[in-house]
Image (tube, rainbow, N blue to C red):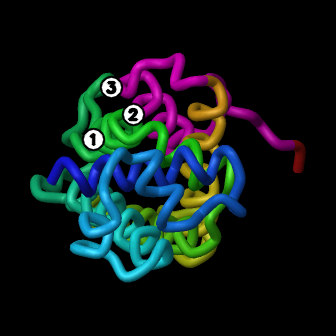
């Protein structure tokens, strides 16, 4: 609904300016809606905040649901899992929200839920690769948190750089580095 989107945007705009201005009156002024319109949907700014989180995270979760699983060996060198691309497209479509909630005014509640969704996606992705446990470099919990951290920091970096790279570039590079590390050549370690 149009009024809800306007109030979400107003909430984010006010957060950028100052968290102290987060009153129903200021939200209504910024969104150009009436107080009765605000109260039709929310009791207070906290309920608006939580609804904004819920809306973003629901869309994020839908983007990262693996509907067409493939073995790793079935992916071509430039082929991306569709979810990786959808992740970055979703963030780009909601750039203001992610810029505010992840970078400018980090919202711990939002970040925790965001990370949980990423962890589930990564866990599901690893499960669909069907790589035998003997071919995995570390215990699964360590890998999940390592990769989720890389995703979050890469997304944050991308946002801080005004999303200058295309979503397809970000998805491809993040996938390549996740699977093969940052180096183009194999490093031979001394024994």
Residue ID for mark 3: 77
Q: Sequence-wise, which precedes: disc 1 or disc 2?
A: 1
Q: Sequence-wise, which precedes: disc 1 or disc 3?
A: 3
- How packed mark 3 is, by other alpha carbons closer than 10 Å (few <14, some 14-19, many 20 or more), is few
Q: Residue at x 41, y 56 (%)?
A: 28
Q: Nearer the viewer, residue 76 or 80?
A: 80
- The quadrant in which residue 190 appears is top right
Q: Residue furthest bottom?
A: 43
Q: Residue at x 48, y 67 (%)?
A: 24
User: Which dot marks residue 92?
Assistant: 2
Where's residue 163, x and y in %?
52, 25
Residue ID for mark 1: 86
| Numbered range of the magenta stretch | 162-189
Q: Secondary structure at mark 2?
A: helix
Asked whether, in this view, residue 106 is left or right of residue 26, the answer is right
Residue 25 is a magenta residue: no
């Amino acid at each position: 609904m149009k009024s809800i989107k306007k109030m979400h945007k107003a909430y984010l705009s006010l957060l950028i300016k100052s968290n102290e201005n987060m009153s129903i009156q200021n939200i209504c002024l910024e969104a150009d809606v009436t107080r009765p319109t605000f109260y039709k949907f929310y009791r207070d700014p906290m309920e608006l905040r939580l609804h904004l989180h819920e809306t973003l995270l629901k869309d994020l979760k839908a983007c990262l649901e693996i509907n067409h699983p493939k073995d790793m060996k079935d992916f071509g060198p430039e082929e991306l899992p569709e979810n990786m691309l959808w992740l970055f497209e979703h963030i780009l479509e909601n750039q203001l929200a992610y810029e505010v909630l992840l970078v400018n005014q980090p919202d711990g509640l939002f970040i925790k839920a965001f990370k949980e969704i990423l962890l589930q996606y990564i866990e599901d992705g690893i499960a669909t690769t069907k790589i035998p446990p003997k071919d995995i470099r570390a215990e699964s919990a360590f890998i999940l948190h390592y990769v989720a951290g890389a995703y979050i920091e890469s997304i944050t970096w991308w946002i801080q750089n005004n999303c200058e790279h295309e979503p397809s570039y970000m998805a491809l590079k993040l996938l390549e580095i996740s699977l093969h590390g940052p180096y183009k050549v194999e490093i031979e370690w001394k024994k």
